[in-house]
């Protein structure tokens, strides 16, 4: 809703009379009396504004907000320029929903168009869409784009985030599509193990860049192997890393997907986030969601139109190839505003700082006693170390106001650093590690 406008009793009576009703209960006349509420809800009585504020502040005080964060694994803490909140906090944007009469909503269409353009430039692809819920859904939707009548099996590298793999399996289960994982070699996808898996029924290979363990995959080699086997390749990429790494498009990928949260969207306790999808022109008509295009109106002025949309409401359910129904335009606008504020140079500097600080952190932790698990693999801003007692280490870091890495199986830990981390924080974390590991 827009700005709250209360309804007076006189206005309520006028509306009821216009509807031919005597009271509000008449609106529920067709609801069986056996299921209608006859007693008040068991909820506390109303409170004054000051009381509500105090109670909400008390509840918020139970949250633990860490001044220093060294955990990523799919959601990352980045600097968000103030202009992003200023622009997207405008009521007209915050309350906008799906543009059913799209061309009337020129502002919404332009914001989506700018977002699509940014994603194409970041990924090196030819077409991008909007309205994907999150990065995991984008990966699953990308797999569905590759499915053919005689090719449906999905190959997913074991270096892909387990949460993404889980969503892909969920989507595939409903369509009775087999999903198989590709083994790793020293933290990255093993090309030798991939070759025998590329059978005639494989539709696509899904890889992550950088992968879940932070290592950089050899996209050129994997793409070549996939295409030689007749399969397409779906690359789940980090948008910040794309500012300094070779893009999926440059590596010959068919589809690039990812989580847009690093692009100006706060961590927000897990959501809402934003999935992005881009592909080659050949696959453009298979993209779910919307594609906004630029044109001119009858007077020759710049205008935007809803060029393509493949929404499930418009076709029979059994014919739908996607379950995307709602609109992620607000999160997409935040991403576009963030990229506009940062610019190419700003984004590149953020990426370089992420990489530099992560490498500093890895070295500091190694000197403190946590050996890297994949010391020979290049990485962006995440890496894995050995960690013999994760619970004790995380508790010690927590006392210092530090959120440590993510514990992994096999007594390992996944660490992350971004441009938000300072050298003081990293040195302090290393000092805590040294005390715990070498008492």
Image (cartoon, rainbow, N blue to C red):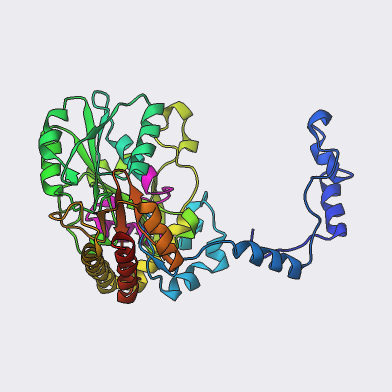
What is the x, y in percent for residue 388? 30, 51
Question: Would you say residue 315 sits in the magenta stretch?
Answer: no
Question: What range is drawn magenta here?
Answer: 112-137
Specify whether residue 227 is in view. Answer: yes
Q: Quadrant of the C terminus?
A: bottom left
Q: Residue at x 35, y 62 (%)?
A: 70
Q: Residue at x 25, y 50 (%)?
A: 211
| Viewer-proximal residue among 272 and 193 | 193
Quarter assignment of residue 202: top left
**Horizontal placement of 203 versus 17: left or right?**
left
* Residue 125 painted magenta: yes
Q: Note whether 275 is above or below 437 in the view shown.
A: above
* Residue 293 in picture, x, y percent from top left: 35, 55
**Residue 65 in picture, x, y percent from top left:** 49, 65
Counting from the top left corner in percent of width and height, residue 348 is at: 24, 69
Q: Quadrant of the N terminus?
A: bottom right
Q: How many numbered marks, from 0 up?
A: 0
Q: Quadrant of residue 434?
A: bottom left
Q: Residue at x 17, y 25 (%)?
A: 200
């Amino acid at each position: 809703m827009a700005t709250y406008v209360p309804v007076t009793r006189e206005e309520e009576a006028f509306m009821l009379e216009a509807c031919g009703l005597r009271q509000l209960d008449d609106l529920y006349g067709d609801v069986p009396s056996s299921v209608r509420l006859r007693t008040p809800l068991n909820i506390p009585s109303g409170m004054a504004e000051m009381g509500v504020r105090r109670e909400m502040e008390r509840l918020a005080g139970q949250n633990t907000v860490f001044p220093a964060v060294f955990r990523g694994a799919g959601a990352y803490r980045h600097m968000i320029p103030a202009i992003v909140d200023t622009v997207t906090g405008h009521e007209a944007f915050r309350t906008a929903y799906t543009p059913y009469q799209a061309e009337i909503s020129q502002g919404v269409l332009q914001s989506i168009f700018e977002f699509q353009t940014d994603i194409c430039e970041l990924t090196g692809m030819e077409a991008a869409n909007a309205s994907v819920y999150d990065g995991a859904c984008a990966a699953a939707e990308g797999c569905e784009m590759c499915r053919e009548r005689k090719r449906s099996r999905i190959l997913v590298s074991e270096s892909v985030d387990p949460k993404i793999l889980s969503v892909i399996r969920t989507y595939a289960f409903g369509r009775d599509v087999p999903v198989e994982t590709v083994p790793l070699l020293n933290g990255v996808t093993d090309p030798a193990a991939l070759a025998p898996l590329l059978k005639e029924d494989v539709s696509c290979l899904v890889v992550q860049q950088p992968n879940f363990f932070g290592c950089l995959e050899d996209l050129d080699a994997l793409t070549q192997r996939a295409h030689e086997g007749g399969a397409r390749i779906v690359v789940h990429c980090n948008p910040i890393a794309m500012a300094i790494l070779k893009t999926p498009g440059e590596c010959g990928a068919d589809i690039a997907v990812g989580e847009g949260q690093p692009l100006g969207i706060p961590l927000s306790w897990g959501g809402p986030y934003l999935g992005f999808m881009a592909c080659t022109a050949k696959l453009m008509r298979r993209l779910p969601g919307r594609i906004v295009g630029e044109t001119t109106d009858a007077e020759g002025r710049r205008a935007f139109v809803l060029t393509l949309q493949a929404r499930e409401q418009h076709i029979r359910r059994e014919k739908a190839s996607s379950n995307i129904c709602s609109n992620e335009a607000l999160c997409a606008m935040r991403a576009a505003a963030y990229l506009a504020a940062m610019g190419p140079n700003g984004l590149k500097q953020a990426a370089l700082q992420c990489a530099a600080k992560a490498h500093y952190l890895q070295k500091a932790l190694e000197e403190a006693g946590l050996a890297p698990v994949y010391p020979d693999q290049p990485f962006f801003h995440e890496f894995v170390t050995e960690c013999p007692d994760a619970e004790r280490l995380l508790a010690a870091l927590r006392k210092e106001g530090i959120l440590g890495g993510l514990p992994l199986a096999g007594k390992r830990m996944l660490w992350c650093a971004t441009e938000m981390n300072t050298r003081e924080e990293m040195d302090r974390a290393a000092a805590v590690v040294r005390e715990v590991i070498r008492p």
